[in-house]
Amino acid sequence: MSKNKNKEVKQRAVNIQKIREKERAVFMRLGAKLRAYFFTGILVTAPVAITFYLAYYVFLWIDKSAHKLIPPELIERYNIPLTIPGLGIILLVVVLTLIGMFAAGFVGRFFVHLGDWIVRKLPVISSVYSLFKQVFETFFSSKSKAFSQCVLLEYPRKGLWVIGFVGGETQGEVKKKIHDEILSVFVPTTPNPTSGFLIFVPKKDVIELNMSVEEGLKFVISCGIVEPENLPIKK
């Protein structure tokens, strides 16, 4: 009898242990799902929240700066409020347009070239200036073909694939050394696409994608969650 009771006690202990293990596994799966949902919520809401937050404070800063341009006499005489929504943006657009009109003329081009020459002669500042000038000329030029195509390439080894953005066909010394048709491809990091790697890849080793650069960036930033749909496959 005592042996049977011991067996029953042991069996009950084993059953209780199995039940506890199942409960633990269920709670772990539930916790993993809740954690995944939480980070997905952050991933979805954070970019929108940060964008609107920054845009709001930039908007207020421009409006306050524009308000300082109004003479105090006019403010007191006409009871002008402390901030006029949208005034700063309007003034900024007008000023930039007037500067563009001036720079397009003969005299304006002379002063632009003069200022460009002076800045390029300054140490340290010239490097930063050249970098930002090239970036803005690349992105705002209507003839620019930078990042006009989204491609797949094997990186960092065979069998692993990443999304890259074609910067253009490589010329100069790089092409002469490799003796092949080479593309300059930018491979962004996830979820921050402002950093990444510049890779020189033979054109025959990349696969062109139909997704746009914007869709590719969304795909990278969302860590593969926001995937373009219903795109024809390019052979």
Image (cartoon, helix red, strand yellow):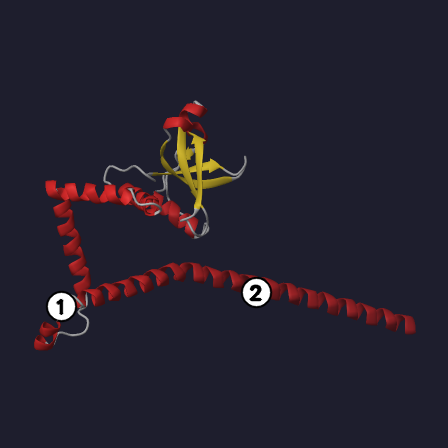
Amino acid carrying mark 1 in the image: Ile
Q: In the image shown, does 38 or 133 lie closer to the viewer?
A: 133
Which residue in the protein does label 1 denote?
70
Gap between marks 1 and 2 measured at Cα: 58 Å
Q: Earlier in the sequence, mark 1 or mark 2?
A: 2
Checking the image for residue 181, the label placed there is none
**Can residue 229 be seen here?**
no
Residue 96 horizontal/vertical position (percent): 17, 52
Above or below for 78 versus 32: below
- Outermost residue on the left side: it is 77
Q: In the image shown, does 193 or 206 lie closer to the viewer?
A: 193
State the residue at coordinates (16%, 60%): 90
Which residue in the protein does label 2 denote?
31
State the residue at coordinates (91%, 70%): 3
User: In the image, is 219 to the left or to the right of 129?
Assistant: right
Residue 48 horizontal/vertical position (percent): 35, 60
Nearest to viewer (mark 1 / mark 2): 1
Residue 211 horizontal/vertical position (percent): 36, 42
Above or below for 17 versus 230: below
State the residue at coordinates (27%, 45%): 119
User: In the image, is 76 to the left or to the right of 142?
Assistant: left
Q: In the image shown, does 79 or 8 lie closer to the viewer?
A: 79
Above or below for 145 versus 9: above
Q: Secondary structure at mark 2?
A: helix
Amino acid carrying mark 2 in the image: Gly
Q: In the image shown, does 93 or 133 lie closer to the viewer?
A: 133
Q: Secondary structure at mark 1?
A: loop
State the residue at coordinates (72%, 65%): 18
Question: Which quadrant is home to the N terminus?
Answer: bottom right
